[in-house]
Amino acid sequence: MEGIEYLKDLALIIVTAKLFGLLAGKLKAPQVVGEIIAGLIIGPSVLGWVGQSDFLSRMAEIGVVLIMFGAGLETNMKDLVKTGPKALVVALVGVFVPLVGGTLIYSLFFGFSEIGSENFMRAVFTGTIMTATSVGITVQTLKELGHLKGHVGTLIMSSAIIDDIIGIIVLTFVIGFKNPESKPLDVAIQTGLFILFSLGVGIITYYVFKFIDKRYPHKRRIPILGLALCMIMAYSAEKFFGIADITGAYVAGLILCNLRDSNYIAEKMDISSYMMFGPVFFASIGLKTEFNGFTANLMLFSAAFVIMALVTKVIGCGLTAKLMGYSTKDSLKVGVGMMTRGEVALIVSQKGLSVGLMDPLYFTSVILLIIVSSITTPIVLKLLYHGEAKPDEPEPAAAS
C-alpha cells in the first residue's frame, strides 16, 4: 500500500492549499502565502501528515517551470520596448542595490568571506533573492486607486518586468559560479551561448507558431505545442548550458508572448498550474521549511533581511527615479511600488535550496518578506496617492 501514498499526499496538498489560499485572499494577503502555510501545517514541522518525497519534488519542479513559462507568456514585449531607457535604468539600479544589501546583511550575521568561497556565494545568493519584484499586488492597488495608467504606474510596471528578467540572469550567474571549478569567463560564455541559442530557436519557433496560429486559431494543439517548447527549452538550458531550467521556461514564454493566441496558451497552462502543479510547488516550500534550530539569531536575521529587502528597493528604484527628474513624491511611489516580493523570490529560493546555496531554515525569512511587503505596499501607496486626481479625471482646480 505504501506505493500509492503519493495519491493521499496530493489530495491533502490540493485541498489544504486551496482552503488556506482562499483564507489568505479573504485577509487581503497573496494566495501563495496561504498555500505555503498549508504545506507548513500538514508537513513534518507541525502535523506530519505529508512528508517530503522524490515524487513531490519532481511535481514541484514541474510547477515552477510552468509558473515561469506563464510569466514569460504574460510579458508584453511591445510595452516593454515603448517605455524606453528609464524603466531599464530603474530596474538595473533596483536589482543592484538589493543584491549588495542582501550580500552585506548575510555577511554581517554569518561572517565576511573571501570572494569565491562557499559562504560568500551564500551571501550573494541572499542578495539575489531580494532582487526580483512581484508587481501583482502593486498592480491591483493602482487599479483600485485609478492610477495604473499614469506615468508612475507605467514606469513601475515596465521596471518590474525588466527587473524579473535581470534577476533571472543574476540567478543564472550565481548558480554558474556555485561550481568550484567554474571560472567567470566560462560562465559568461555559457550564458552568451544560451542567449544566442534562444535567439536562434526563438525566431524560428515564433514564425512556426505564428503560421500554426493563423491556420488553426484557438485550437488546443497550440498550447500543447507551447508546453512542449517550454519543456524543451527548460531541459536544454540546464543540460547543455548549465543554466537554471526556469530560465529556459521563461524564455519559452517570451518567445510566444506576442502571438495572437498567447493569452489562450496562458489560460490553458494556468489550468494545470492552478489545479495541481502550482499548489504542490508552494506547499512544498512549507514542507521543506524547518523550525528545528531556528534560534534567536536567525529570528533577528529574518527581521534584518525583511527590512533590508524593503529599504533597498525604495532607495534603489526611488532614488533613480528622482535623479531622472521625477518629483520626490512620485519617486517614493516608484520605490514603494517595487517593494513587493512574491513567486519569483520563492522560485529563486527553491532553486538555491536545490543547488546547496540556501538552508531550509531561511525559507521562513523569505515567507516573512512576502507577507510584510504584500501588506505594507498597498497601505503606503494609498497614503501617497491620497487626494490626487486620477489620470483620466480633471484636476480639482480645472474642474471648478
Image (spheres, rainbow, N blue to C red):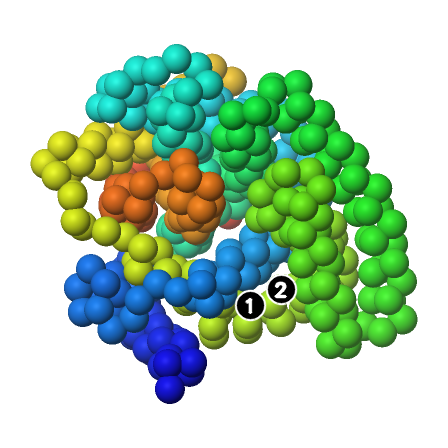
- Type of residue at label 2? Ala
- The quarter of the picture where the C terminus appears is top left
Question: Percent from the top left, x then y, of residue 133?
Answer: 44, 40
The residue indicated by pointer 2 is: 266
Tell me if mark 1 has few (under 14), some (14-19) or many (20+) residues whose alpha carbon lies within 10 angstroms of its own.
some
Report, in whole angstroms, how far the alpha carbon at label 1 lies from the one at label 2: 6 Å
Residue 197 drawn above or below residue 246: above
Instruction: Identify the residue shown where x is 57% and y is 31%.
Output: 176
Q: Under tag 1, what secondary structure?
A: helix
- Dot label at residue 270: 1
Question: Percent from the top left, x then y, of residue 59?
Answer: 49, 65
- Type of residue at label 1? Asp
Position of 67 with respect to 100 (left or right) is right
Please say whether residue 87 is visible from this viewpoint: no
Q: Quadrant of residue 296?
A: top left
Question: Percent from the top left, x then y, of residue 244?
Answer: 58, 43
Please say whether residue 284 is visible from this viewpoint: yes
Instruction: Identify the residue shown where x is 42% and y is 82%.
Output: 4
In depth, the one of 108 and 389 nearer the eye is 108
Position of 341 with respect to 109 (left or right) is right
Position of 63 with respect to 331 (left or right) is right
Position of 122 with respect to 173 (left or right) is left
Residue 386 drawn above or below residue 23: above
Q: Are marks 1 and 2 in contact (CB under 8 Å)?
A: yes
